[in-house]
Amino acid sequence: MRQGTVRSGEEDWTRFQRDERWANDTMPELGAPDFLWASAIRASEEQRLRHDRDEVFHRLLSVGMFDWNGRDHRMDPTTLAMWHSSAMASRLLDRVRRTEDQV
């Protein structure tokens, strides 16, 4: 996935362990808007690195994650809703793929 940041106490962790921590971090220190933004970034990174990605699905997620006109709408309720739905769709896609791999 991504290289992952090394946090204190994780010096001996493998890249896979850091990636797993990053992918499943609930980020309890963040408030809701910051968590939604971080989740959108995480989903974007996961989609960007996926080798078998569906280009249409990736574009749909990207439209929901980024404000392409450059204005700052972080606290706009529609922006928060788009970040939420994009992050949820990405997590659900990952769960579907993991389930398919088990079958």
Image (spheres, rainbow, N blue to C red):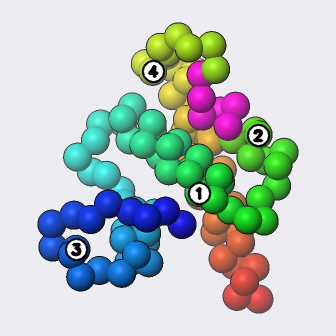
> Local crowd at mark 2 within 10 Å, few (<14), some, or many (≥20)?
few
Residue with the mark numbered 2: 59
Of pointers 3 and 1, the one earlier in the residue sequence: 3
Residue 80 in magenta stretch: no
Marks 1 and 4 sit apart, C-alpha to C-alpha, by: 22 Å
Disc 2 marks which amino acid?
Answer: Arg
Name the amino acid type tagged 3. Answer: Glu
Which contiguous range is marked in magenta? 62-67
Quote the CA–CA distance across marks 3 and 4: 32 Å
Figure quadrant of residue 3: bottom left
Q: Nearer the viewer, mark 2 or mark 4?
A: 2
Task: Assign the C terminus to one quadrant of the image.
Answer: bottom right
Residue 31, quarter of picture: top left
Q: Is residue 45 rendered to the left or right of residue 15? A: right
Q: CA distance from mark 3 to mark 1?
A: 22 Å
**Number of residues whose C-alpha sits closer than 10 Å to that of mark 3, classed few (under 14), some (14–19) or many (20 or more):** few
Identify the residue position indicated by label 1 in the image: 46
Labels 3 & 2 near each other (Cβ < 8 A): no
Q: Earlier in the sequence, mark 2 or mark 4?
A: 2
Q: Label 3, secondary structure: give it.
A: loop
- Res 10 label: 3
Task: Give the label, 3 or 2, closer to the camera.
Answer: 3
Instruction: Inspect the magenta stretch and tell me whether residue 64 lies in it.
Output: yes
Amino acid bearing label 4: Arg
Main SS, magenta region, reads helix
Q: Which residue is mark 4?
A: 74
Which one is closest to the eye, mark 3 or mark 4?
3
